[in-house]
Image (spheres, grey):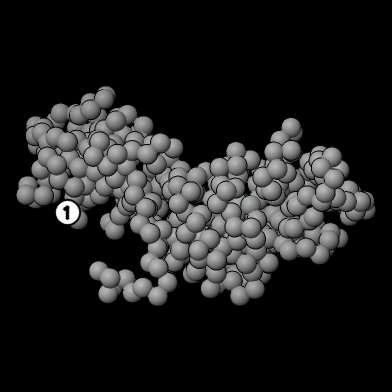
Amino acid sequence: MHSVNRESAAALLTIDLGAIVANYRLIAGRCAHARTAAVVKADAYGLGARHVVPALVDAGCRDFFVALLVEAEALADLMPGDARLYILNGLIAGSEPLCAAIGAIPVLNSLEQIARWQGEALRAGRRLPGAVQVDSGMRRLGLSAQEVNTLAQEPERLDGIDLRLLMSHLACADETGSDASAQQLDVFRQLTASLPAVPRALANSAGIFRGEDYQYDLVRPGIALYGGAPLDEGANPMRAVVRLETSIVQLRDVPSGLGIGYGLTGAVDHPRRIAVIPVGYADGWPRALSNRGAAYIGGHRAPVTGRVSMDSLLLDVTDVPDELAHAGAAVELLGPHQTIDDVARDAGTISYEILTQLGARYARQWLPPAQPGVDRGKAA
Ligand SMILES: *Cc1c(COP(=O)(O)O)cnc(C)c1O
């Protein structure tokens, strides 16, 4: 992504790498026996993988997951020699030589993919690292029970492949009330029992917080690293990572009974003061937040009113003190008063989508983690 000048941008996205590292350490502290990996697909959930990865490498992370080969290519040069870079979506036909050349580890999701990776190892004349995923019940990626059985009967299908990991993925890990995860845990145990004794991995962020049974040898957190609540209930133990700030472009007073913006929606039976904010759905602020949700001005809640436009949205600032709500005044969209989970809930989506849609027109700044041994308080 090209970088946006702070001076010309209408909004500033601040990404706290120290908070990501703190979240990584909190998770690692919860995993007595498992190594903690980092899922950095989709540009580290929109937060800039080329900034996030080195911070996590410094924190000791050596296992990274992306979804696609194109993402692995973009990060391969940041990997220390002892790091592993896995590709979750598997091996696209024709991509085998490139995948081998950059040293990425494809997550092989079918016997057919295993065969192609074995073919590549034969062609290359060396063993190639691979992971194998089994479908424990999500019915998305991974070998079926029947394929697992075939693989167990015909272990030579893995000849030439340096098997590094057996994994699966949970479909309902964040739903505290669901027993689907316990069932998947059972199926995972059964399916992998007949396969080679290599490290196993099952848990995403939510799975990690389900407890040690789910953690196996390696855990794969994504959203929790980036500050999202891992579970659908209880306090969020993770530190917030992003802040999104913009400023008021223009204010106007609207008489009682008049709608505003596209469609002239959001009319009310009292006069009000409306502020225009230069962030819209083209910046990833969901249009579903039309007449829903809010922003904060000097800590005061200002509800979104009218429809979210492509490049702007409207806030009702009637209840915000005049000395705070003026043209140029700072507006918090994400920060201490409003988390990614708050916005996601108001928009009827999940924090993952809020993060991965964060706009290309924002200026971005990354706050570096505190250096080991340097006391932040003293430095300030
Ligand atoms: C995206 C993904 C993760 C990370 O999930 P979070 O819920 O963000 O922690 C882990 N494993 C797989 C297979 C994934 O696709």
Callout 1 crowding tier (Cα within 10 Å): few <14, some 14–19, many ≥20: some
Q: Residue 170, located in which quarter of the rendered image?
A: bottom right
- The reply, left or right, for residue 186 in relation to residue 231 is right
Most foreground residue, 276 or 66:
66
Coordinates of residue 87 in the picture (x, y in percent): 65, 46
Q: Which residue lies at the image location 74% right of the left edge and 58% below the top edge? A: 164
Q: Is residue 289 visible?
A: no
Most foreground residue, 363 or 306:
363
Q: Quadrant of the N terminus?
A: top left
Q: Which residue lies at the image location 14% right of the left edge and 34% below the top edge? A: 250
Most foreground residue, 24 or 321:
24
What kind of residue is marked 1?
A: Gly
Q: Is residue 95 visible?
A: yes
Residue that carries the numbered disc 1 in the rendered image: 298
Is 88 situated above or below 288?
below
Most foreground residue, 131 or 294:
131
Q: How many discs appear? A: 1
